[in-house]
Image (cartoon, rainbow, N blue to C red):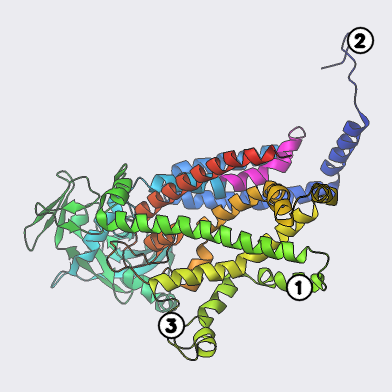
Amino acid sequence: MTPTNTDPEVVVSPRQKKAARLAEAASGGLKIILLKIVLLGIVDAIAVYALFVLVLKDEWLVAAIVAVVTLVVNWIYFSHRAIPAKYLTPGLIFLLIFQVFVIAYTGYIGFTNYGTGHNSDKDQAVQALMSSARERVPDSVTYRVTVVESLEGLGLLVTDPDGEVSVGTATSPLTEVDNAEIDSNVAVSVPGYTSLSFQDVLQRQGEVFDLEVPVSDDPNDGVLRTGDGSSANIYLSSLIYDEQADTMTDAETGVVYSDSGTGAFTSESGEELLPGWRITVGFDNFARAFGEESIRGPLINVTIWTIMFALLSVASTFLLGMFLAIVFNDKRMKGRKFYRIIMILPYAFPAFLSALVWAGMLNERFGFVNEVLFGGADIPWLTDPVLAKISILVVNLWLGFPYMFLVATGALQSISDDVVEAATVDGAKPWQVFRLIKLPLVLVTMAPILISSFAFNFNNFNLIYMLTGGGPRDTSAGINVGATDILISMVYKVAFTGQFRDYGLASAFTIIIFILVAVIAVVSFRKTKMLEDLN
């Protein structure tokens, strides 16, 4: 729009002019433009590759999100108006991927039966069940094949005994083709596929041996498998899937398994065929956590120990750090700088390495503590439930007090000497000066740090896992949990260790932990507002 004489005069401050010049300089110049084009080209190339993969896997929603985000990013960085968005976009994208998506996906998994035996969708579960029960048909026809490859992966170019040629992959059943190249009455290539040489088949024989190409859309028609890459036979499953009735029948025993809504084919006697598939189960995981005695008991014990561990860790590190800060803040002490350096040494080593060192020192048979300090005694520091908890608290005190010492030292040094002198002149004793003046002022500074320290120790996974691994194991529990496990380490074990992994239950535990920490943090911060009145 062209300015007119009636438009109000726009007043631009020197600061705004300087910002405009910097923005213009940053957005201009041939080198900057070329760099921008190169970086956006890399982003677009990655996005196009991701789109190909997502479309091939029928992930249309995610593909649409990737396409929209890519277009928005290109518009932002080629636009001359969206200057603030150019600085905010990278951070927002990482925030959405690593924070928002993770939280939302964890919440979603907490309401499903996702875990061992329920990892995929129903179609994949049917394929897996059929595959696990397949056997080669005796005296079946032998087909001449050529191993080929396409974007879908490996496949077979099949020549049947009548000379008809068809091609298929693990995800696409055999389809008849009429444009294949024939050599010695065997189809050796077809447009759209790359034929593997004999050397290629040898190098990838594991993939070739595991390859199963469906004969048709009906899984009951079986699959073709090859052992040498040149001939294939039909394999049929002893399980028969009835898509109309949605049942799976064992041809050998005659038992019928039906979809009863539990994420698996189940017989009338309650026997389940695994693998099953992933379904939404509502609040069932939360009901299991609080309803099943074998889970509720360990969950309560772990929750109590987690709160005690966090509270005792904060209290012990704060008290020791505060005491040392008071001692080394006394100007009458000589060599204070040297002692302060010594005090913060544990803080200088990575915590997980220190935990591993302590695990070796506390070893029952070969550890330094038993061998040297206790004359070769066999004290089970890490294998007895009570001693293991004490060991964890002591090691955490070793790791945590330097931080409290540094913060308390800074807080004490910020208190004016005039305040202390005035109290002394009024007749206050040293203990009264500390209790009524120094401690409240220090708490004003350290209260948020104590709360954050509580939250940190509430999820202090590294110490627990490196020192005791959560052990000793509670054999009476219905889940994989030990005497020193805290909630976060218990979640890790339920989700990622052991023979049976239950991601749904672990996600439900995660949501419970989030609620606990959020409630404690809100209450704590409200309580600390009373300390602000001291200022």
SS of the residue at dot 1?
A: helix
Q: Where does label 2 land, which residue?
A: 5
Identify the residue shown where x is 56% and y is 54%: 454
Instruction: Single out the residue that lies furthest toward the top.
Output: 6
- Residue that carries the numbered disc 3 in the rendered image: 379
Q: Is residue 193 visible?
A: no
In the displayed structure image, the side of residue 61 where residue 336 appears, left or right: right
Instruction: Describe the element under mark 3 as helix, strand or loop.
Output: loop
Magenta region = 77-96
Q: Which residue is mark 1?
A: 339
Q: Earlier in the sequence, mark 1 or mark 2?
A: 2
Rendering coords of residue 336 (x, y %): 80, 70
User: Could you say which is closer to the camera, residue 237 or residue 110?
Assistant: 110
Q: Quadrant of the C terminus?
A: top right
Residue 291 visible, this angle = yes
Q: Please name the amino acid that badge 2 sits on.
A: Asn
505 above or below 379? above
Q: Nearer the viewer, residue 71 or 104?
A: 104
Query: Up-down: is 418 above or below 225?
Result: above
Q: How many marks?
A: 3
